[in-house]
Amino acid sequence: MVVRIKNEKDFFAGLFFLVLGAGFAWGATTYTVGTGARMGPGYFPLLVGILLAIIGLLVMFKAMVIESGDGGKFGHFAWRPLCFILGANLLFGTLLVGLPVLGIPTMGLIVAIYGLAVVAAMASDEFKLKEALILATVLAVGCYVIFVWALGMTMPVWPSFIVG
């Protein structure tokens, strides 16, 4: 009996969910899980990982049972958006707290958000710098109001060479 994948996209999406969920569940076992009444730090990640793995199995099963019109062929891989989105997140973390090993100082929340928004916007084929800067301004003001002003979180807001 040969099992045939009838929808490649759904199959690989389900496989991704399965692997990611299993990884989270396995990683959560290194923490104290506890019980339902007294949950430990590993309880929620374990539960979410298991649920994600189950969803992955269900999606994979559906992909092998239900026929789709075009077969759900797995097309080309979108490398440009992937690289820009991952790069934007790495840039955000680096700018937020700096990287002393490489001599990169802390640039703070505002500069990090501008870097994140502009680089992430470059993932699109329709990149417009003006729109990215407007988005960055709205995000920077919103994050400052929510995290620094309202919640009182202590984090670097401005570059370290400006505030000392």
Image (cartoon, rainbow, N blue to C red):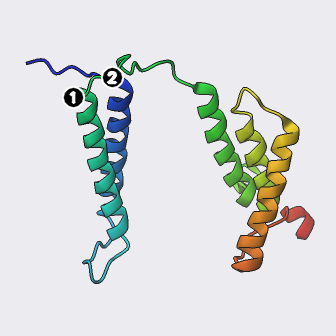
- Indicate the position of residue 123 as horizontal and vertical percent values: 69, 33
- Residue 39: quarter of image: bottom left
- Indicate the position of residue 116 as horizontal and vertical percent values: 73, 47
Would residue 75 appear left or right of 99 to someone viewing this image?
A: left
In the displayed structure, 115 sits above or below 148; it is above
In the displayed structure, 111 sits above or below 64; it is below
Q: Amino acid at mark 1?
A: Val
The mark total stands at 2
Q: Residues within 10 Å of mark 2 (few under 14, many from 20)?
A: few
- Residue in view at x 25 percent, y 28 percent: 66
- Residue in view at x 85 percent, y 61 percent: 159
**In which quadrant of the rendered image does the N terminus lie?**
top left
**The one of 138 and 26 positioned closer to us in this rendering:** 138
Residue 17's disc number: none
In the displayed structure, 156 sits above or below 131; it is below
Which secondary structure lies at badge 2? loop
In the displayed structure, 114 sits above or below 81; it is below
- Indicate the position of residue 82 as horizontal and vertical percent values: 59, 33
Residue furthest left as drawn: 1
- Residue in view at x 65 percent, y 47 percent: 89
Residue furthest front as drawn: 69
Kindly tell me whether residue 105 is visible in this rendering. no
- Residue 97: quarter of image: bottom right
Q: Residues within 10 Å of mark 1 (few under 14, many from 20)?
A: some
Q: Which residue is mark 2?
A: 68
- Residue in view at x 64 percent, y 39 percent: 85
Q: Which residue is mark 1?
A: 65
Q: Determine the CA span between mark 1 and mark 2.
A: 10 Å
Would residue 126 appear left or right of 38 to someone viewing this image?
A: right
Would residue 9 appear left or right of 139 to someone viewing this image?
A: left
Kindly tell me whether residue 142 is visible in this rendering. yes
- Indicate the position of residue 24 as horizontal and vertical percent values: 36, 54
